[in-house]
Image (spheres, rainbow, N blue to C red):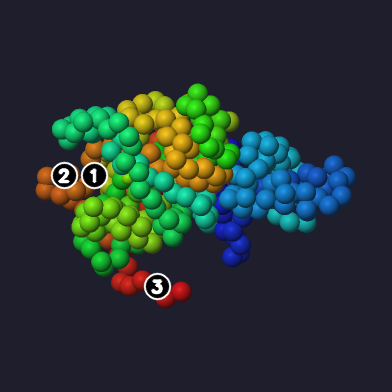
Amino acid sequence: MKLINFTKDGHTRAGAIVENQVIDLNYAYQAQLKAEGKYRYEQIAAAFVPNNTDELYQGGKESIALANGAIEFALANPDSFDKKLVHELSDVKVEAPVIKPGKIICVGHNFRKHIQEMGREIPSNPVIFAKFANTILGPQDDIPFYPISDQLDYEAEFTFVVGKQARNVSEEDALDYVAGYTITNDVTYRDIQRRTLQWLQGKTVDGSAPMGPYLVTSDELTNPSGLSMVLKVNGEVRQDTNTEDLVFSVPKLVAFLSNLMTLEPGDVVLTGTPGGVGVAMDPPTFLKDGDVVTIEIDQIGVLENKVRATEAVPVR
Ligand code: MG
């Protein structure tokens, strides 16, 4: 399943993309239950196929399987319910496949060739840091460029979302705890990142984690290794790698992180970026207003966002 949230008429709901259509998962499951003659279909659907992805992940594989069935029902019976089950993709705004994850854990220095070309030792423990839910943008949003720095940089990141509560999970069992995979641009204000030892302040500016174009669920993408990953700025290739080059693979990260903390459904892990970031170019080349950053990962898709200079922090 290509899982998203989508906004239509001011409401944001969980959906799945099927070709050029978006299925409303909660309404689809309600419609299916009603057609089966079930009572309290609204409440049952709210429990098992809720209307936002953060809660849907809490239902684990059971909820994903029910949602898959509901998609088939909706496509076969699009007009069977008093709510719209199927939208044209062009009629909705596609949002990130998470809304307010409890954790966004990021890994630094995780691509073997990049570490070696920088003359560093392969680390024995991953570097980890955090972003927060304020950074999340969808695939159709622009990346805001606030006038707090002139060193805005990109980082292509293969990303997974946790699908089941995980504590002290072994590498062998780790993939069973993954809901699916997506792409994130770990947008970084490079000078702000580097002005103190802790990177956090350059990593947590509003809108610095565009994510998408959707989450490919782990029943469809079963092997997260061996996926090619390319980032372009205005069509020019800047980063080009493969997830088989990760020092700390997805299973290793699930095992390592779940040894430290309980991972919850919906938690997001960005697995690190390869060589080729703007700050490492000669001369350093940063993003500017109007630049288009495109990240493509094999078996997932393409995440493309435009950089938009933003005069001031918007008043909420
Ligand atoms: Mg990063």
**102 or 28: nearer the viewer:** 102
Sequence-first tag of 3 and 2: 2
Image quarter of residue 219? top right
Q: Which residue is mark 3?
A: 314
Proximity of marks 2 and 1: CB atoms separated by less than 8 Å: yes
What distance separates the C-alpha of mark 2 from that of mark 1?
7 Å
| Residue name at image x 30 percent, y 65 percent | 146
Marker count (numbered): 3
What distance separates the C-alpha of mark 3 from that of mark 1?
28 Å
- Within 10 Å of disc 3 (Cα), the crowding (few <14, some 14-19, many 20+) is few
Looking at the image, residue 211 sits to the left or right of residue 46; the answer is left
Residue 11 appears in the figure: yes
| Residue name at image x 64 percent, y 36 percent | 61
Q: Secondary structure at mark 3?
A: loop
User: Can you name the residue that lies furthest to the bottom here?
Assistant: 315
- Within 10 Å of disc 2 (Cα), the crowding (few <14, some 14-19, many 20+) is few
**Ligand 1 shows up in which quadrant of the image?**
top left
- Within 10 Å of disc 1 (Cα), the crowding (few <14, some 14-19, many 20+) is some
Amino acid type of the residue that numbered disc 3 sits on in the rendered structure: Pro
What percent of the width, then of the height, locates residue 221?
Answer: 51, 30
Q: Which residue is mark 1?
A: 277
* Quadrant including the N terminus: top right
Q: Secondary structure at mark 1?
A: loop
Q: Secondary structure at mark 2?
A: loop
Q: Which residue is mark 2?
A: 281
